Structure formats: structure tokens, C-alpha cells
Image (cartoon, rainbow, N blue to C red):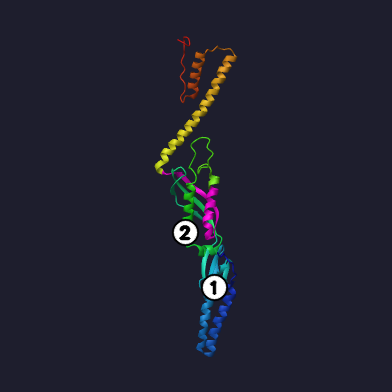
């Protein structure tokens, strides 16, 4: 497989002086000798004119002579090369690509919407010009394919507490690194350098977004309740121990069970407790 070859073109201003000399010579010869044979020199004048071209900063010209790749000119300025060269312009500037949102299934089958932000540039003009058709379209298609593959490799999120699996939502650093590696591998054939690739948008598809929101809320409520219960049990245990140590009241099993029940209701309830004054005994 061939690779890019840099070549140096002639200075355009020097060739412009040569062109002017040819034009002056033709005109002077025709005026002095009145010989029409000097018109033959019009052909080399046209060829010299066809050889001029301009290369802007961070741009290049791929030179092809009758189907044979001759090299790439990356030098900036007003230049001249073989007039029979065909010259294809390829930009070397960094470009942003913001892909469209695509709907795909994550690892566990949930439909999600996802897109990617890609920063890329051409690093090998030969591959970009000749190894693929329309390298800009190639970047778009392969990026879309990489995003679809990535989305199917990770779940959107973990719902069970304690799971260490990397997800699209929580493992952004690792996921973005995997995405960048995947796109880099796919675009290498086109001589494209991936400067940065990251997920730009991530959400559940509209048809399940409401259900997943309720599921996330339920998981959050269960986790919060679990913490509340753990804290309440510790507080009840401390209260019973303090009352016993200070000999404020002696508890039999029935009294202890009743107090634990009341304390748990007060501590774990989501509403303020309503005090009740008992004027009799605990068993009345």
C-alpha cells in the first residue's frame, strides 16, 4: 500500500517572470519580423499558465500525472508544477463533526438516543484521495457505525446497587476512550487522524423514557429508605441502651417491643408523628 509522498513545487513568481518573457518575446518577434511563426509560442505560454496554483495554509495539493500519483505539495504560497498534473485540493485543517442522533439498543436491549462529537483531520493525503471514495462521507458513515457498536457494548445505567459494570452514563471516560479507539481503527484506512471523540448526547428513547424515569426514582427511593432504616435501627438501639444504663425504666420484652415499634414508626415515617398522651398504663 502506498503512502503520502511530499514533493516541492517551483516558485510561482519565478515562473511568472518566465511567462512574461515569453509573452514579450512573442509580441516583439511578431512586430519586428512580421512572421506568424511566432504564434507557435502561444502553446508553451498556455502550458506555463496551466502550471500555476496556490496552496493555502493548512491545505495541500495532490499531484497526479495521467493516473500516476506523483506526490503531495504542502508548501504554502504561489507555486508552479508540471502543467499536465491534475491537482486535487485536500484540506489539512482540523474539522468538527457532530453526528445525528441515532436510536440504538444498549447492551441489555433498552432503546436509547445517542450521538458523537468528533474532531478529525487528514494525516495521509494519499489514503484520503485514493484508498476511499469521498473521505468526508467515509468519516460520517464509519463514525455512525462505531457509535452503534459502542452503544451495544455497554448498558445505559446500572440499577442494582453494588454493580461495578461500566455504563454509558457513569463510565464516560472509559466509554469515550473506547469510542475514540474504535473510530481511529475504522478511519485509519482513509488516512484520517482522530483528535478527539466523545459522546455528545445520551438519553433513553422517548417511548421508554417515562418508564425508566419511574424506575430510577423507585431505585432512589428504595436506597433512601434502606439508609433511613439502617439509621433508625441504630438510634433505637442507642436509645434502649441509654435508658437501660441510666436505669430510667425497666423494660420487659413486651415493653421493649412496643417502644421499638413506636420509635421505628416515628423515625422511618415520611410524615410528622402525632403525639398521643397515654394517661393510663402501657397495657391499658
Crowd tier of the residue under label 2, counting other residues whose Cα lies within 10 Å: few below 14, some 14–19, many 20 or above: few
At horizontal 52% and vertical 64% (from top left) the residue drawn is 90
Q: Is 52 situated above or below 129?
A: below
Q: Nearer the viewer, residue 53 or 61?
A: 61
Q: Which residue is mark 2?
A: 137
Q: Is 239 situated above or below 182?
A: above
Q: Is 214 situated above or below 64?
A: above
Locate residue 23: give its quadrant: bottom right
Q: Which residue is mark 1?
A: 52
Q: Nearer the viewer, residue 47 or 62?
A: 62
In what quadrant of the picture does the C terminus appear? Answer: top left
Question: Is residue 197 in view?
Answer: no
Q: Position of residue 279 (x, y in %)?
A: 47, 10
Q: Nearer the viewer, residue 32 or 1?
A: 1
Q: Is 243 situated above or below 12?
A: above
Crowd tier of the residue under label 1, counting other residues whose Cα lies within 10 Å: few below 14, some 14–19, many 20 or above: many
Question: Is residue 41 in view?
Answer: yes
Amino acid at each position: 500500500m502506498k503512502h503520502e509522498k511530499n514533493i516541492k513545487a517551483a516558485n510561482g513568481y519565478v515562473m511568472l517572470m518566465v511567462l512574461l518573457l515569453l509573452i514579450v518575446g512573442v509580441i516583439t518577434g511578431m512586430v519586428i519580423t512580421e512572421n506568424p511563426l511566432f504564434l507557435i509560442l502561444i502553446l508553451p505560454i498556455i502550458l506555463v499558465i496551466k502550471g500555476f496554483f496556490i496552496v493555502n495554509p493548512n491545505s495541500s495539493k495532490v499531484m497526479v500525472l495521467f493516473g500516476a500519483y506523483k506526490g503531495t505539495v504542502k508548501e504554502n504560497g504561489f507555486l508552479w508544477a508540471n502543467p499536465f498534473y491534475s491537482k486535487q485540493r485536500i484540506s489539512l485543517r482540523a474539522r468538527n463533526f457532530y453526528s445525528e442522533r441515532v436510536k440504538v439498543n444498549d447492551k441489555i436491549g433498552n432503546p436509547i438516543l445517542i450521538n458523537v462529537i468528533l474532531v478529525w483531520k487528514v494525516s495521509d493525503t494519499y489514503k484520503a484521495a485514493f484508498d476511499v471514495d469521498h473521505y468526508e462521507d467515509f468519516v460520517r458513515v464509519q463514525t455512525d457505525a462505531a457509535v452503534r457498536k459502542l452503544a451495544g457494548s455497554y448498558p445505559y445505567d446500572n440499577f442494582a446497587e453494588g454493580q461495578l459494570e461500566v455504563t454509558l452514563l457513569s463510565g464516560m471516560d472509559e466509554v469515550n476512550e473506547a469510542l475514540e479507539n474504535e473510530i481511529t481503527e475504522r478511519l485509519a484506512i482513509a488516512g484520517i487522524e482522530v483528535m478527539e471523540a466523545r459522546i455528545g448526547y445520551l438519553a433513553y428513547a422517548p417511548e421508554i423514557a417515562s418508564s425508566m424515569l419511574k424506575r430510577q426514582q423507585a431505585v432512589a427511593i428504595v436506597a433512601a429508605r434502606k439508609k433511613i432504616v439502617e439509621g433508625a435501627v441504630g438510634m433505637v438501639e442507642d436509645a434502649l441502651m441509654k435508658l437501660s444504663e441510666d436505669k430510667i425504666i425497666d423494660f420487659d420484652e413486651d415493653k421493649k417491643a412496643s417502644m421499638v415499634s413506636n420509635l421505628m414508626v416515628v423515625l422511618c415515617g415520611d410524615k410528622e408523628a402525632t403525639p398521643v398522651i397515654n394517661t393510663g398504663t402501657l397495657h391499658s
